[in-house]
Image (cartoon, rainbow, N blue to C red):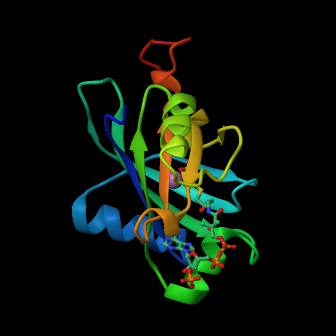
Amino acid sequence: MLTRIDHIGIACRDLDATVEFYRATYGFEVHHSEVNEEQGVREAMLRINGTDDGGSSWIQLLEPIREDSPVAKWLAKNGEGVHHIAFGTADVDGAARTVGDRGVRVLYDEPRRGSMDSRITFLHPKDCHGVLTELVTAAQDTPEDPGHG
Ligand code: V0V
Ligand code: CO
């Protein structure tokens, strides 16, 4: 059902400085960056590796663009650090249904738009032993478009 770690989401106060740390320290480059208004973040995706199911694994660096956003709220309480983990699946709708049936609160009725046109949903951290958990189907993983875009 869940086939890989799609990404680790890291909350930071200064996206450019954090990107520079990952570049200078590890040699990771930004593959993609965007603003997600709905989620209230400016983000950069650093591609770590490809996987044999056609997806990839990423570090997702997140800077809040609004004080009332989940990442801003989390930063105010915890400071910078790991904010969530995201598992990759070819079928986020089915995976969310299955996990929901197992008693975990799924935060969205329908998956929403995530980074790079992925489809994402979240599981409540209080139902996941303190870990905000995201389920994601990458754009290139969707059954309608099995290509390698
Ligand atoms: C909150 N809590 C967390 C947490 N955020 N625990 C672990 N990890 C986190 N990231 C805990 C918090 O300490 C509280 O525990 C409790 O949950 C309620 O938190 P709150 O501060 O009162 O905040 P809420 O309830 O208003 O919101 C929490 C939820 C919210 C999880 C519902 O953050 C949310 O909707 N998150 C999903 C959306 C999101 O995070 N978007 C940003 C990434 P105590 O103090 O009661 O014990 S966007 C993204 O990943 C994208 C675009 C992508 O991947 O493509
Ligand atoms: Co994420």
Residue at horizontal 57 percent and vertical 31 percent from the top: 93
- Indicate left or right for 20 with 117 as reference: left
Query: Total number of numbered labels?
Result: 0
Vertical order, 145 against 104 (above or below): above
User: Between residues 18 and 106, which one lies in front from this camera angle?
Assistant: 106
**Quarter of the image containing the N terminus?**
top left
Horizontally, residue 31 falls left or right of residue 110, namely left
Q: Where is residue 71 in the image (x, y as percent from the top left)?
A: 61, 71
Residue 102 at x, y percent in the picture: 47, 46
Could you tell me residue 34's position as x and y percent? 62, 49
Q: From the viewer's perspective, tell me whether residue 24 is left or right of residue 120.
A: left
* Whole-percent x, y for residue 14 in the image: 54, 75
Q: Residue at x 43, y 66 (%)?
A: 131
**Point 75% across, 53% down: residue:** 38
Task: Look at 60% across and 87% down and name the residue there.
Answer: 76
